[in-house]
Image: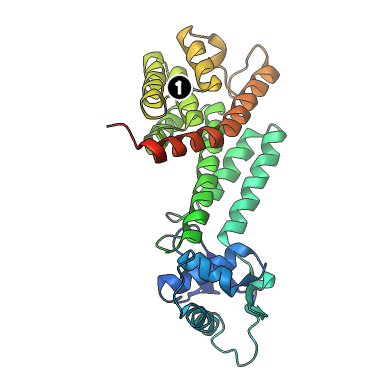
Amino acid sequence: MNHLRFSVLGPVRAWIRTEEIRLGPPQQQAVLATLILAEGTPVSVPALADALWAGSAPATAVGTIRTHVYRLRQALEPACTSASSVIRSRGDSYSLATTVHNCDLKAFRSLTSKADRARREGCLRDVARHLHHALTLWQGEALQGLPGPRADAHRHVLEHLRLQAQTDRLAAELELGSTTAAAVDLQQLVARHPFDERLRTLLMLAHYRSGRQAAGLAVYDEAQRLLAQELGIDPGPELQEMHHRVLRADPTLLHSAQAPAASPTAHVQACAAISSTASRDRPARSAHRRNRLRCTGPAN
């Protein structure tokens, strides 16, 4: 059954060769998505029930789940008359056979891993190429329309991976000299993720390299005001450093991989350090933001 393929980077979908399969109602799709994301690891019926109902499963939960699995088997193996080779049973658990695990998420991870290797080797064009390809796999919000707390949790993780790939691609494009195009995309991402300081750091750099120093400084001013009002914190060190460098018109900020700099190696290392520090800082500051908003709510 290696002609089966699945998609979770958008609505949950499945194909047998080129023919798309009808997967049934959202709850049934959520069962399939849980098995896909488990990547061959058995998922127990109680775990599936928790994924769908979060501890509030009805008395009919076990029967409902078994019905969903039965119908998924019929859809994925319409001609099968024996034990399923796609959704396997073991005790009270189900798993998706690893031999059929052809999924867009797997392809996405493979491409982002290639981009990581290319970055370590200093091949920025390959970084941008692999990440561009990876992002074309997305067809909307991950697990679009699926109910349940487990789907929400997976969706949050997958969307974070998407944002990281988008940010890494734009960082590479910026270093390759695509300043104007990168600035447009960065502005859109900052509008959707206003607390993401790495995005703002890159947008400041894009504005500065485009000769818009004032616009770059305005990005910082907005971040400083937003962080103070909503979270009661100051911008992180990498955003503050970019602000200081733009403010004093640091000429080394104009250097990119397309233009020779006085010390190319040092410049690449500095860019990598900014990227690494921002990536490490992002989850902690995002968690701080979530905790503050949960306790106090956004400022009016």
Q: Helix or strand or loop: what does disc 1 sit on?
A: helix
Residue 226 x %, y % = 37, 26
Check disc 1 and report the residue beneath it. Answer: 204
Q: Is residue 36 left or right of residue 215?
A: right
Q: In which quarter of the image is the N terminus?
A: bottom right
Estimate how packed mark 1 is, as few (under 14), some (14 to 19) or many (20 or more) residues with alpha carbons within 10 Å.
many
Residue 293 x %, y % = 40, 37
Say how the picture is coloured.
rainbow
Residue 110 x %, y % = 65, 52
**Residue lying furthest left:** 300
Residues 93 and 213: in front is: 93
Look at the picture and state if 197 lies above or below 87.
above
Residue 13 x %, y % = 48, 68
Q: Quadrant of the C terminus?
A: top left
Residues 49 and 107: in front is: 49
**Residue lying furthest top:** 248
Q: Quadrant of residue 83 in the image? A: bottom right
Q: Can residue 13 be seen in this view?
A: no
Q: Can residue 190 be seen in this view?
A: yes
Look at the picture and state if 121 lies above or below 157.
above
Residue in view at x 64 percent, y 72 percent: 100
Look at the picture and state if 90 lies above or below 242.
below
Q: How many labels does the image show?
A: 1
Q: In this view, does 97 lie to the left or right of 161?
A: right
**Residue lying furthest right:** 121
Residues 57 and 2: in front is: 57
Q: What residue type is labelled 1?
A: Met
